[in-house]
Structures are given as structure tokens and as C-alpha cells.
Image: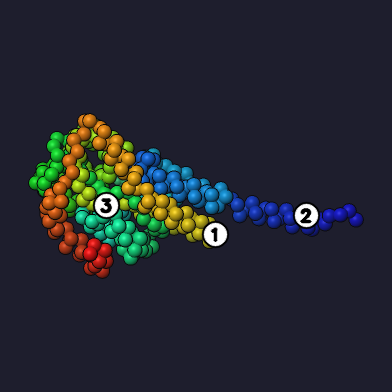
Amino acid sequence: MIGFDIKEMASDTYYDDEQEGLDEQIIIRLSYVTAENTPKGRTASRFATLVEDKTNGQVIVHLFPNATLYNDKNEWKAVQNGNVEMIAPATAKISEHYPEWQILDLPFAFPNYRAVEAAYEGEIGETLLEELDRSNVKGLDLWYNGFKQITNRDYSIKTPDDFSRLHFRTMPGEVIQEQFNQLNASSSTLPFSKTYQNLEVNFVDAQENTLSNINTKKFYDYQQYLTISNHGYLGYGVLINRDFWNSLSPSIQKAINDSISEATDWGRRHAIEINDQHARALRSNKSLDIYTLSAEERAQWFRTLQPLYDKTRQTVGSDLMKELNQIKY
Ligand code: LMR
């Protein structure tokens, strides 16, 4: 008898087929609205590299920046329906569907980066991510960007009175609308990807955003005045379609979770520096007039916006508000 066994060959072949089946490539489409050179873009790209490495190329992440696939208006539906596997919208955009998320968009909720980190990575973040279990998405984590600043077309905004009668572009979310109501400004909720052209045609006078978003989207073309106010924080929920998630093996889920945690870590350590790079670029832009609020001016904004805290408490509940207060003091 010649030296190989047909049964063994068959079982070897079967084993190879199994392996092939197991190694089938998994594509994750991650759609987001900002430019690539932003905290979100860079964190997403870090995640893509990490998960590809950890799975030896079995999981590939296709990144779709700049709202090329979906914008603020349709990305939520797209991830629910599985037309895209992952999105990372601003927390304000999630609060449209889950009002408890409004707590993260309260003006002056966070006195510094450490407070943001404590909320995102502590009890508040955990509670909010669990809230998402009621929908067809799973909340994986919270990602960092930075504090929001104000830009305006015709003059520097320094006092609460300076907001009066201006028309602002805003993200969705009740707390943000209320913020502008309280300041006697009007507002329109517009997708991030449409902000530039709405500034261009003067449909809106002003907007709030992080320095990385202001610089990468060239809002300064139509916004000569920038106020460094650090009045609110802009960060993201990282969401994955639940049916897709449930279809993955435990080892792939682990690789994704580990990669997300490492990417979040990286984002936390680099988001400030990325915004600082954009701050330097904006400072060297001669056409831009930059004003930094004094501590007294910030305190005046905070006092004006106080009524939002009572309203938001009614929506998010006193437990979460208590958590927030404990972080601050
Ligand atoms: C905005 O709409 O202004 C931001 O949410 C954009 C982003 O994703 O940072």
C-alpha cells in the first residue's frame, strides 16, 4: 500500500475548508462626518489598524470620512438598518434618540479634560452606553474631540448679550437648542456637511465647534471672529449594528472590543494635541480675529445658562445629574 491514507487526506481537506470558512474576511464600514485629520478621524484610523493587526487581516475596516457615505441626518438609520456597520456621531446627535445623552452636552458641564474623562469612562458613560441596548445598535465606547468654541461673521462674541438676534447653525439635541434660546439667539439644526455652504450664503451667522472641525472645514472663510469659550464638550458615541455584532464569533468580538479600547486610549491621549495643532494653524491665519474669554466672562455665560440645568435634570434624571456634580467637586 502506498504511504498515504485517502481518509486522512479527505479530513485534511475538510479541515482546510473549515479554516477557510473561519477566516472569511469581515468588512466593517465605518462612516463619519469629519475630516480625517481630526481626533475622530485619527482615532477611527487607529482602530482600523489595530483590529486588522489583531485579527491578522480577517477584519478590515473601510473608513468613510467627510460624510461621503452618510451625513448626520441619515447615518443613524443607516446603522440601524445595517447599511453601514459602524458610526461615531457626536453625543448631541445621539441625544435626539436617547434624551439622557443630553447631559454630555450641557454647557459648562466639564471644567477640564479630567472631568470629561471621568464622565466618559465612568458611571455616566457606562449608563449611557447601556441605554442604547434598546435599539439595534450596541454602544462600544465614547471617543474624544474637544471643547467647543464660537465663530461669528461680523463681530467678536464676548458677552451673553452678543448672541442676541444671531442665527446659529447647531447640531441636533434639545439642550443645544435651549442653550441658544437662553442666549436669545435663533438656531437651525443643519448637518455638519452642510455648514460651510450655509455660512457661505449667510443663512446662518455663526456656529459652535471644536478647533479641529473649524480649521479642517475652513469655516474661517466666512467666519472672521473666533471666541475661545470652551463652553461645552464635543465627543462621540461609537456604535455598531447589533445584528452584525451578534453574527461575529466571540474571538472577533473580543478583538474589536480590545481595539476600540486601545483606540479610545490613544484618542484620549492625542485629541488635545490634535486640536492644538489646528489652534496653531488658526492663530497663524491673519484674517481671523481670535478672542479668549476671561474667567469673569465665562462665569457670566455660565450664570446665564444656569436654567438649562433644571430643565435637563427633568430629562436625564437626578441620578445622572448627581454623578455629574460629584465629578465637578
Ligand atoms: C458637528 O456636527 O458640528 C460635529 O458633530 C461634527 C463632528 O462629528 O465632530
The answer to whether residue 288 is seen in the rendering is: yes
Q: What is the spatial separation of the Cα atoms under label 3 and label 1, in whole angstroms? A: 34 Å
Q: What is the spatial separation of the Cα atoms under label 3 and label 2, in whole angstroms? A: 61 Å
- Location of the C terminus by quadrant is bottom left
Please state which amino acid type lies under the numbered disc 3.
Tyr
Check disc 2: other Cα within 10 Å, few if <14, some if 14-19, many if 20+: few
Residue 206 x %, y %? 19, 40
Helix or strand or loop: what does disc 2 sit on?
helix
Disc number for residue 233? 3
Frontmost of labels 3 and 2 is 3
- Which residue is most to the left? 161
The residue that label 1 is drawn on is: 251
Residue located at (39% from left, 44% from top): 41
User: Which sits earlier in the primary sequence, circle 2 or circle 1?
Assistant: 2
Frontmost of labels 3 and 1 is 3
Residue 276 x %, y %? 30, 43
Residue located at (44% from left, 45% from top): 45
Helix or strand or loop: what does disc 3 sit on?
strand
Residue located at (26% from left, 52% from top): 233
The residue that label 2 is drawn on is: 9
14 relative position to 59: left or right: right
Residue 150 x %, y %? 20, 43
Q: What is the spatial separation of the Cα atoms under label 2 and label 1, in whole angstroms? A: 29 Å
Q: Is 309 rendered above or below residue 64? A: below
Please state which amino acid type lies under the numbered disc 1.
Ser
CB of mark 2 near ligand 1 (< 8 Å):
no
CB of mark 1 near ligand 1 (< 8 Å):
no
